[in-house]
Image (spheres, coloured by chain):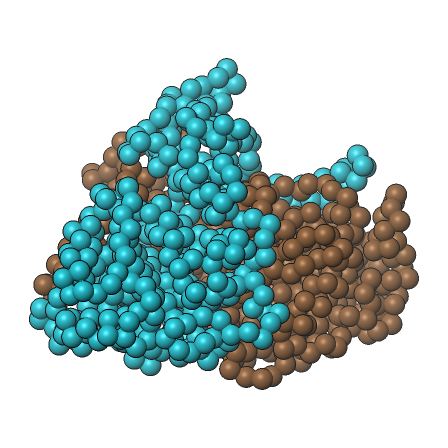
Chain colours: A brown, B cyan
Amino acid sequence: MKKHIAFLLWAFLPFLASAQQAIFNRITIQSPEVNADNSVTIRYNGAKAKSVQVTGDFLENGAVANLAENKDGIWEYTSAPLAPELYSYSLIVDGLKINDPNNIAYSRDVASITNTFIISKEKGDKGDLYRVNRVPHGSIRRMWYHSATLGMDRKLTVYTPAGYESSNKKYPVFYLLHGAGGDEEAWMTLGRTSQVLDNLIAQGKAEPMIVVMTNGNAWAEAAPGESPEGFTVPSMRATKQAMEGGFELHFPEVISFIEKNFRTYTDKKHRAIAGLSMGSMHSLNISKYYADKFHYVGLFSGARIGDRENTTCPVYVNFDAQMAKLFANKPALYFLACGKTDNAKKGMDSLKAYLDEHGYPCEYMETDGGHIWRNWRVYLSVFAPRLFK
Amino acid sequence: MKKHIAFLLWAFLPFLASAQQAIFNRITIQSPEVNADNSVTIRYNGAKAKSVQVTGDFLENGAVANLAENKDGIWEYTSAPLAPELYSYSLIVDGLKINDPNNIAYSRDVASITNTFIISKEKGDKGDLYRVNRVPHGSIRRMWYHSATLGMDRKLTVYTPAGYESSNKKYPVFYLLHGAGGDEEAWMTLGRTSQVLDNLIAQGKAEPMIVVMTNGNAWAEAAPGESPEGFTVPSMRATKQAMEGGFELHFPEVISFIEKNFRTYTDKKHRAIAGLSMGSMHSLNISKYYADKFHYVGLFSGARIGDRENTTCPVYVNFDAQMAKLFANKPALYFLACGKTDNAKKGMDSLKAYLDEHGYPCEYMETDGGHIWRNWRVYLSVFAPRLFK
């Protein structure tokens, strides 16, 4: 066996060593390390550093913890035992925020790139749901569709459940929309959509379904780096299309593309739509404007009632009439979810009051915390099992 | 319009601001900025920093350049005009290597996460080939297949050319293999495979084809973070399967999966295989062991001639007989490529001498530089247009 290892080293190590010259990094220590008691140990190799800290959402809101240095120049911090969750963090070395050079798990959230780790205590908990488990896996497709109304080719992400390729069955479709600053990748990375769906379906908790993740920025062809615009920094550019319902008005093109290219049911009972923040407002608008298209509607942390001033865009006027038409069609589920300290809570509460006042049936889920992915993953995990049953 | 912008700000900015609390980053300045003369300006906002440097492959091998500070605490460095290329770099702030906090373009190469930018001078140059252009785009699928021989589900990445979904045509298949430390994502990120293929096909230089990118680590189910093992640090673990031809012996399972799930031709003339480094050796082995399967073979920076000692694995013995059988089947192209300073050059030269000695037709492309992605992107760009014509 020794000889075999020697062969491998001979064969590949010299290549790797030279592959990227000065900028090539090597993993030197294990960080993070999830311990048996579900605490996490963060390490940093830095004999020259004067102070090393960690900041992240596994600490109290906004908190920073100090790493302690041992005699070998390895800095270390061990947290309290943590609840099951996907956590994000960064290191702070001598006052400078950096990514953990020993952790290749990271996600981009708008313009922030942070390291991540997952805590899971037992089968079926949140961490377990967000992990890749040894279950049948769906496929992910990144595809381009043409939008005649927006005048461009646009990218979207499609999850098809395990078994899609090996069967001739038709599937229901769940359209899942991101928030401002996000794109067609947002629900895939911090949202963990493919892991959540794989696991829920494998556990028999959710029906096999197709999930379509669009780009909700009507001015954009695709996520940063995926479009001809290059790596434009995500922003909330106010363009004509963004302000005047461009995304909502073009949405039938998405539905047509999906129903043409995948084996889907094409009736209202087999369509769901949900979104977070800006995507929640998009879902609210789309579901009422196309009042006979969606049987399930999920609004996560974003709502607005009434007509928008200074616009003639058909999406933003006749709010009362559109809502009346939607509920006349008796959607199977109209689901609101929001964090108790979420900046969107006021809008969500107003919408709930409006629905109650008009006798429109809905459900309202309230969680701790604010306008964060931790909540949106929970809402997805609760909403998806309610669909198509 | 002002009112509209105000609405957007009201609606989303407070949410964004609170979204990730302490770890949320904001883009403050433009870095990098590609200038009209194809120089690049790197900037860093750091009034507290004592020294700011940049290191990257757009500088001389291993070099580091100093940024200069202006009165506002913005540090800046402008390079010489650069040749068309995809470049990688990192910042060094007070001696600490960090990613550029104002650039969301980055790639992971084994364990290194570095920022990237692309320089292009004109239509058709290297930078243009690596960019997303306004051309018809193929689709990318991440799928799982079952390997009975390796006893696991495994992930692979498949590029289908523009038009695949809207036609009933059959397509040829190009199997493209990564190197040690890589995975089924390696050719997609620093290799820019989907951009290169989209652009070459749009320019009429390459035939529309399916490209299959496998995971060549026989012990692994998928890339770090994509498998049940979690974010295991990439390494060259020497396992039974890795050492004894596990990947090569299971390869027919990949071909079966692809030909079952895609509209492909299924004859030798419509199959190609190529790889870099470890993937080059895999391609060498697979093409000779299954001597009637591939009409086009590309070996980029990795070769080994003769029988392996201390093994009875059928892939690694009877080298002469297998090569004789392969060339008796008259492959359309047997293509070698290597950098002049590549550590793999000696092996490639030996193989070239062996081929010449036996009268086996081949082509040998030599480029400047070493064992780097810059070369492998070029080899892909040269090899792909030669296929299926």
Residue displayed at 28% across by 34% down: B61
In the image, residue A363 sits, relative to residue A265, either above or below, namely above
In the image, residue A382 sits, relative to residue A92, either above or below, namely below
* Residue A242 spot, x, y in % from top left: 74, 47
Residue displayed at 59% across by 43% down: A229
* Residue A214 spot, x, y in % from top left: 64, 59
Q: Is residue A388 left or right of residue A202?
A: right
* Residue A110 spot, x, y in % from top left: 57, 45
Camera-nearest residue between A34 and B94: B94
Residue displayed at 30% across by 80% down: B149
In the image, residue B257 sits, relative to residue B181, either above or below, namely below
* Residue A28 spot, x, y in % from top left: 26, 47
Q: Is residue A315 visible?
A: yes
Residue B319 position by quadrant: bottom left
Q: Quadrant of the C terminus of chain B?
A: bottom left
Camera-nearest residue between A94 and A312: A312
Residue B385 position by quadrant: bottom left
Camera-nearest residue between A78 and B355: B355
Residue displayed at 59% across by 57% down: B136
Q: Is residue A162 visible?
A: no
Q: Is residue B223 left or right of residue B334?
A: right
Please identify the residue farthest to the top as the structure is shown. Answer: B71
